[in-house]
Image (cartoon, helix red, strand yellow):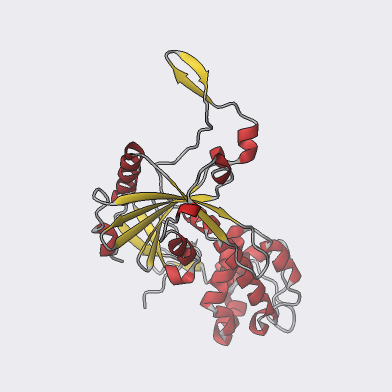
Amino acid sequence: MPIPPAFTDFSIEASSVTVWLFKKSAGTAGVAPTFKGHWIATDDGLDAELKASVAHERAKIEEVLEYGLLAQNNEASALRISTAETLADRIVDQTTDPLPQLKVVDTRKIQNTSFYVIRLVHGDAVLHAVRKADASFRTKRRLNAIDVLFSDNTLELLPSPGFSLSRYIDFFIVGDDILITNKASFESVLSYKEAHAEDFQTLQAEADFSQLFTDLEPLVAFVGSNKIHLRRACAIRAKGHYRNADFMGRLRQNHAQYNLTLQFNADGLLVPTPETCGDIITALLDHRLTSAFSHNIYDVPDATQLN
């Protein structure tokens, strides 16, 4: 997949910089979290460092892969997802206008920042670089620490608290695209894990799925709040193999020869147990494959169909 030209062609060096600090509500079941942003003044030296960091992070991306629940990128790639599938528009909308009343004027607006956004503007083009805030922004950490500065071979008390802005970027927002370099932080900032949990609830309520089992509770307990299992459960729903009667028939007939430890009752229903739930997930993802060349059997992290 090509890297979006709006990303590669953006003039970072010639852009202007605004830094926005965001706090995020926890949200509740079925209700998305809210974001509250404030912008903070920065000097020319910091602006130059931030632009250099953003340019360095952009230069590391040599390829773009489509975001998937189980997809993973490496140090030279990014995952792409549409902004329409996320809450990113709430970040973009809030950073459009740095109103005077939204300017940070005391440290209370900085403390407990959830994430920050480096907003770069050049002409009509805008690039947002987002990073999850580290522990230096947390009030609890501040209360348990004495801020000091090493100067002239001596430790001195720092008159104002210090905060750390990372040289790394978790994801970029450009136009209708999000390019993700840190998947876990992206999902945390934009509450994608919560969406996974809601999707799993929907899957459980789907008759085509629930009626495959003698009892769904062992599988629900196995998945729990584990983010990897939740992603896999969502991928099961997206792939929809369980709705295919032929697929399920072949699974019942051939699971043993693929070393899948599955149990079926006399009516052909899956009997989930703590020992078999992992293989149930693998089977419904269609991730247990065999090589036509070596005849070896493999588990694959993200099966991509080519035909």
Camera sees residue 3: no
**Image position of 274 (left or right of 62):** right
Quadrant including the N terminus: bottom left
Q: At 45% from the left edge and 72% from the top edge, which residue is drawn? A: 84
Q: At 47% from the left edge and 61% from the top edge, which residue is drawn? A: 94
State the residue in front, 123 or 77: 123
Q: Position of residue 126 (x, y in %)?
A: 33, 60
Quarter assignment of residue 107 = top right
Q: Position of residue 72 (x, y in %)?
A: 44, 58
State the residue in front, 44 or 283: 44
Quadrant including the C terminus: bottom left
Numbered-mark total: 0
Q: At 50% from the left edge and 33% from the top edge, which residue is drawn? A: 162
Q: Position of residue 9 (x, y in %)?
A: 23, 59
Q: At 29% from the left edge and 64% from the top edge, which residue is drawn? A: 4
**Given the current orientation, which residue lies at the most extreme front position?**
100
Camera sees residue 57: yes
Q: Position of residue 301 (x, y in %)?
A: 48, 61
**Given the current orientation, which residue lies at the most extreme top position?**
153
**Image position of 72 (left or right of 212):** left
**Image position of 149 (left or right of 76):** right
State the residue in front, 9 or 304: 9
